[in-house]
Image: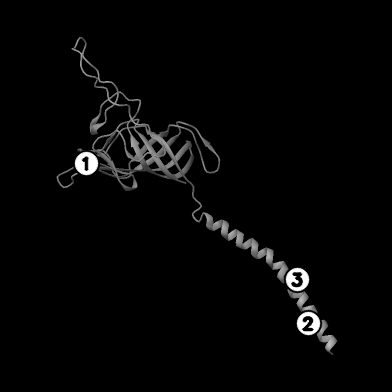
């Protein structure tokens, strides 16, 4: 009787040990999978790139929802490895627009970018918020809102005058933040620009550094 009991106990222990050995790799795999997912719970990618406005913007003439068009000033690579060429269109919209009035001491213009348009019908969704902004470095004009760059023209045969050339427009990089090279304009949260002028005006060619989530 004792011998039969010992044989039975040994068999039960052997079966339990085998089952535990089989379950161990599965449990380890489940733990590793869970850890991999928690490493990036949102599954989103982040990046920074610069665009150039294709058309001028004026908060006095715009309203919420109006489209905004720009283009990449350099090639980028999407999170899936797909290259996107320089000059590709980037489309956004106006989030708010307001001219200065008696009841408002400042004018405002908010912009967010929504997609990269690689070709007709081929769009890549994104969420791009302004991180920094600077005048068009290639322009030779002076516009409202305090923008001024390039050489100031002098009349022929005029007496010699001090050098009135302004410093070149700032070049944006990944560390740039806020409004650079434009007077009386500030950048607030969520890409909202404010100015003490009658309106917020941005020239065609204005450079915008975007903080992008895809």
- Residue occupying image coordinates x 75% and y 71%: 18
Task: Give neighbour class at mark 1: few <14, some 14-19, many 20+ (Cα, 10 Å).
Answer: many
Query: In the image, is 70 to the left or to the right of 196?
Result: right
Does residue 74 sit above or below 19 in this rendering?
above
- Residue occupying image coordinates x 64% and y 63%: 28
Query: In the image, is 37 to the left or to the right of 165?
Result: right
Name the residue that disc number 3 marks: 18
Q: Give how far across and how far down residue 79 sits, in percent.
A: 52, 43
Name the residue that disc number 2 marks: 9
Q: Give how far across and how far down residue 150 sits, in percent.
A: 30, 23
Q: Nearer the viewer, residue 100 or 69?
A: 100
Task: Give neighbour class at mark 2: few <14, some 14-19, many 20+ (Cα, 10 Å).
Answer: few
Mark in front: 1 vs 2: 2
Mark in front: 3 vs 1: 3
Tell me where residue 57 sits by quadrant. Answer: top left
Q: Which mark is residue 157?
A: none
Name the residue that disc number 1 marks: 99
Tell me where residue 23 sits by quadrant. Answer: bottom right
Task: Assign a secondary structure to mark 2.
Answer: helix
């Amino acid at each position: 009787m004792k011998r039969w009991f010992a044989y039975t106990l040994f068999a039960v222990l052997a079966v339990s040990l085998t089952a535990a050995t089989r379950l161990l790799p599965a449990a380890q795999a489940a733990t590793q999978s869970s850890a991999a997912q928690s490493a990036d719970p949102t599954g989103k990618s982040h990046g920074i790139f610069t665009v150039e406005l294709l058309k001028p913007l004026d908060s006095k003439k715009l309203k919420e929802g109006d489209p905004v068009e720009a283009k990449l000033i350099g090639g980028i690579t999407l999170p899936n490895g797909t290259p996107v060429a320089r000059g590709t269109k980037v489309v956004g919209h106006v989030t708010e627009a307001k001219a200065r009035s008696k009841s408002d001491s400042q004018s405002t213009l908010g912009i967010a970018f929504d997609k990269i348009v690689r070709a007709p019908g081929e769009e890549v969704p994104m969420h791009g918020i302004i991180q920094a902004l600077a005048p068009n470095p290639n322009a030779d004009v002076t516009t409202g809102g305090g923008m001024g760059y390039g050489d100031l023209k002098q009349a022929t045969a005029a007496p010699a005058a001090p050098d009135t050339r302004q410093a070149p427009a700032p070049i944006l990089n990944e560390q740039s933040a806020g409004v650079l090279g434009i007077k009386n304009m500030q950048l607030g949260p969520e890409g909202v620009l404010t100015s003490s002028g009658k309106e917020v005006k941005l020239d065609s060619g204005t450079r915008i550094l975007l903080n992008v989530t895809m």
